[in-house]
Image (cartoon, rainbow, N blue to C red):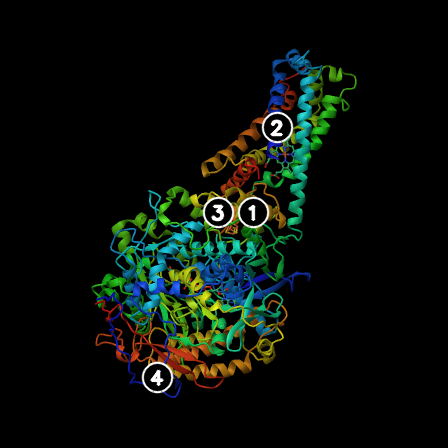
Amino acid sequence: MAVSGLVFLGYLVLHMYGNLKVFAGHDSFNEYAHHLRVFGEPMLPENGLLWIVRVLLIVALVTHVYAAVVLTARARNARTSKYVVKKNLASSLSSRTMRWGGLTILVFAIWHLLHFTVGKVNPNPDGTGTADPYNLLVESFELWWMSIIYLLAMFALGMHLHHGTWSAMQTLGLTGTARARARAKTAGWVVAIVIAGGFALVPLSVLTGIVSK
Amino acid sequence: MAFLDGTTQVTKPPVQVSDDARGYYTLGEPLVDPVAPTGPIKDRWTNRKFENRLVNPANRRKMSIIIVGTGLAGGAAAATLGEAGYHVKSFCYQDSPRRAHSIAAQGGINAAKNYKEDGDSTHRLFYDTVKGGDYRARESNVYRLAEVSANIIDQCVAQGVPFAREYGGLLDNRSFGGVQVSRTFYARGQTGQQLLIGAYQAMERQVAAGTVEQFTRHEMLELVLVDGKARGIVARDLVTGKVETHLADAVVLASGGYGNVFFLSTNAMGSNVTATWRAHRKGAYMANPCYTQIHPTCIPVSGDHQSKLTLMSESLRNDGRIWVPKKVEDCDKDPRDIPEEDRDYYLERIYPAFGNLVPRDIASRAAKYMCDEGRGVGPAVKEVDKDGNEVMVRRGVYLDFADAIGRLGEDAVREKYDNLFDMYERITGENPYQVPMRIYPAVHYVMGGLWVDYHLQSNIPGLFVAGEANFSDHGANRLGASALMQGLADGYFVLPNTIRDYLADAPFEKIDDSHPEVQAARQDVEGRIAKFLSINGTRSADSYHKALGNIMWEYCGMERTEAGLRKAIDMIRELKADFWTNLKVLGTADSLNQSLEKAGRVADFIELGELMCIDALNRRESCGGHFRAESQTEDGEALRQDEEFAYVAAWEWGGEGGQPVLHKEDLIYTAIEMKQRSYK
Amino acid sequence: MNLTLKIWRQPDTSAPGAMHTYQVEGISPDMSFLEMLDTLNEQLNEKGEEPVAFDSDCREGICGMCGMMINGQAHGPEVTTTCQLHMRSFKDGDTITVEPWRADAFPVVKDLVVDRGAFDRIIQSGGFISANTGSAPEANSVPAPRDKAMRAFNVATCIGCGACVAACPNGSASLFVGAKITHLGELPQGQPERDSRVVGMVGQHDHEGFGGCTNIGECTAACPKEIPLDVISQLNKDLRTAMKHGH
Ligand SMILES: Cc1cc2nc3c(=O)[nH]c(=O)nc-3n(C[C@H](O)[C@H](O)[C@H](O)COP(=O)(O)OP(=O)(O)OC[C@H]3O[C@@H](n4cnc5c(N)ncnc54)[C@H](O)[C@@H]3O)c2cc1C
Ligand code: HEM
Ligand code: SF4
Ligand code: FES
């Protein structure tokens, strides 16, 4: 779980770096998107790198979801009769919403792939579609509801990462002292804000007109 | 003056002239320890280990031993006998062996390691323990205890008991209970817990290995004798209510102390006398039942809802000053408003040399006298006085840290006593950094118990008794940090080496549940249970327990008198009659029924209480924890009567309605000389 | 003070249970929570209604026998055991909900009493150091670094009460297991069996039906002995080391 989660995290960092290229302008962003596809040619076929990453992500996803399902099932069986009153004292909201949050992210990821990668969901059927990622992106986020979907998803992601990062460090045995524990908690916040915030910048910038066609 | 050659007899057998308990008992044959060792005291145990017969390892698995109790004594015995390969069946009434009341011991455990090079030795620990016990313990037993004490520490460290350590990583010691050497090993204020967890883990390892069978939530309710030998027990499964018989080649009782006969004590709620009392009724002698240790620094009773009392470590007396107001009318004032000249620092006044550090029994009695005079502090609680009237009495004295805080600063005091102060505040809701603490004595430990010989075997063949449940090592008073030592000595080192001599003749005749004596024992238990449930009166078992506690505390507590004890015996007899006609127990026999459990325990406490009073009445001397007002020096100190009472009083059950039979075992010291103590 | 109590009553493991409402009057703030329940039981006994079954023994916060969910918090609103909780933590007129620990690995025996035998079985599967009586070397022959010995002690204070399990949304006993792993693992004597211990204990933990840890932290907040969460980190680390060693 921790390892697969961290694989996602690593991917997200790269992905975010790419997304932030929108601030460098139309051509730069499209070139990057193209570059991703031809990276490593001719050693790798077209889309080679992308496929390696995709395979890795799929393996991670299967592992992660499998572990999540097992943990959820164990937790459910561990307490079949519920408390009439139960208070939460120390747990963060994010720690308690990992399952729903994860599911939200999964649903979102599917939507997101349909949107950008497959191009099935296209706000502007007359536009250039996936052939021009920059325009597709700007056109999409100019629609307020599309931005809201993304922003909500990023909020869910931030929550998931807030607990996930700390939890992964704890699982990996990196929190042996009170200091290390405090550090891991901080890391949770930093990762959540940087990643979710980084992604959120793009739709926000489009909405506010900082980025336009 | 100590005699090491083991030949010089210092004391003569006693001759009793006073007979306060006449009419309450019959005198039986004198008693001698049939396996008492002889020879130089330091060789006695070594020789005995050699003389005791061995059991072939291949045969051990065929021999079974029942051990009742999983405290330090029972847990350690189960682990060790399991390791040796015997088939052990272990019983406790809690839901896990780890919860035995040994867990509550705070202060520490003594051992003659002499790590501090301060002059400690086996002999000194032996000497301190016999003297501390006011010369009412058997010297051979005490010497053995001191001898194996060092092995206990080795064993516990090997098991992972996290004792306090010095910066160099070696074990730390502190001085405890007024002795002049530092021989107490400790794990902060939780020594008992850590030692017990060590024994528990060793025992669980044997459960996994299949040598120990563990029966939790099982209460022993009867001893099974077949042909005069202890061959098993009848126990009730507290969850299903099923009455079960368990048979074996030998039975060990390690069921702890009976301090709860006083209702309020520092013992656990479930601590009981049932296991040993049932054995007593089957013929095992009960020795010195009146010897009770009352600890001076406990948190006072706050009202008649009180269910138990909490001990505060004795170390508090090192820095706190004990006082009460000089004037009765000041007693309900805020203590901070009482000027210095209106305070009576009574221990410092009466015992200028030792002051607040006088021994436990003296400090306890002095506090009682102050409160009897009406100068106690804190909430007034309902009591019944000597004439049977209900009165409100304040039972508490101040333990004041204002001077220490002034002298050392609050931070220094906090560093030393932080956890104790917190505990006090949690229970009382008062902040002891600002308001003086209130303390009052409470029953804490019983030195009395089933009579055993040098092999820890009772007078019933095959019935062994270990830990606080036996009477053997502490005489009339126990030194701090030596009950843990005794429990573990018995369990790890003594019992495994003595029980093998008995088991060398085993396996004994095969018996099963259908044996008439087994059947009879079981039917007795079922009959008793049915009786409790059918009385259908109006009072709960708890209310009888409280009433008994009040009688015991008033008349058989810190100060005992002939008239008081006689009165107490009458009151207990009345209470007993009422109990058996007016008890109310709801629920059923075949389910978890805590009221029913309680009823059985209270029934036995009532009978024990009567015997304690008779024993106290007979012993017209003051020794250790037993203070008879008739036997004191001119200035009010305890006075022993060695000519008459240098004996162990071993009581035989006299039958229902009959009189107990007193057997005297003379105490003969060859390696130590008897002295009177003085703290002025 | 006067209180309304809502208490879970269940005659035995297999029978269904339900919440029942009782009134108690004249409760003193100096009473402990369990003394308040004693008072209720005395009243019930008088009325001919069977008293509420609950566990307690030492009543000084060390044996780990007591434990119940009080207003949704394990051992109630203070960081301590149920037996050391006092009524001054409540107000006159309060309604207090009392439930047993709820975890399938801790089946309810009756009312508020549960069976924590699973903890014993976890200890049996490795929570010890094998040292037969008599085989121990001289205690000071193996020094133990003081800081490690202190850490071992701090986590060895676990009383096995089960509040961690009761509070954990996953019903996991990782804090309990981690405390024992850390206690024995910090001491030189605990090294030889370090790998087999963690593998055995975690295996039994899962086998008993406790949930998996997702590092939520409710356990440590409920723990009366304030066992820190880093014992779970230690548990994971030791488990990984053991796996590396081929377990
Ligand atoms: C608050 C407190 C502090 C103390 N501090 C110290 C100290 O600092 N140093 C020191 O040396 N001593 C101390 N003592 C004394 C010491 O702790 C005890 O004397 C000692 O631990 C007793 O051990 P044990 O094994 O004999 O019995 P216990 O630990 O009391 O165990 C009794 C066992 O018997 C079982 N049992 C009882 N009756 C039955 C039955 N009928 N059926 C089945 N099972 C039964 C119980 O379940 C339990 O397992 C203290 C005592 C108290 C109360
Ligand atoms: C970009 C996507 C994701 C990232 C970066 C991510 C990251 C993480 C991390 C680091 C952890 C902590 C691992 C540990 O405690 O050992 C975690 C836990 C978890 N994740 Fe994800 N995850 C992602 C997607 C998902 C998805 C799609 C699901 C949905 C099924 C999901 C469900 C969970 C669950 C249930 C946990 C369990 C731990 C807990 O409850 O605390 N995650 N995730
Ligand atoms: S870790 Fe804490 S909450 Fe869990 S059993 Fe131990 S003492 Fe109780
Ligand atoms: S009763 Fe022992 S910890 Fe509460």
* Residues indicated by labels 1 and 2 sit on the same polypeptide chain: no
Residue A106 falls left or right of residue B676:
right
Disc 4 to disc 3, C-alpha distance:
54 Å
Label 1 vs label 4, nearer the camera: 1
Q: Which amino acid does the dot numbered 1 rest on?
A: Met
- Name the residue type under label 4: Ala
Task: Look at 57% across and 48% down and name the residue there.
Answer: C173
Q: CA distance from mark 2 to mark 4?
A: 85 Å
Whether A45 is drawn above or below B456: the answer is: above
What is the number of the mark on residue A32?
none
Report how far apart the C-alphas of labels 2 and 3 lie in the structure.
Answer: 32 Å
Residues at marks 3 and 1, CA–CA distance in whole angstroms: 18 Å
Q: Residues within 10 Å of mark 3 (few under 14, many from 20)?
A: many
| C233 sits left or right of A151 in the view | left
Q: Which residue extends farthest right? A: A126
Q: Given contact means CB atoms under 8 Å apart, are the residues at marks 3 and 1 in contact?
A: no
Residue B563, disc: 4
What's the mark number on residue A7? 2
Ligand 2 contact, mark 2 (Cβ < 8 Å): no
Helix, strand or loop at label 1? It is helix
Q: Which mark is residue C201?
A: 1
* Chain letter of the residue carrying label 1: C
Could you confirm whether marks 4 and 3 are on the same chain? Answer: no
- Indicate the position of residue B132 as horizontal and vertical percent values: 30, 66
Q: Are marks 2 and 4 on the same chain?
A: no
Q: Amino acid at mark 3?
A: Ile
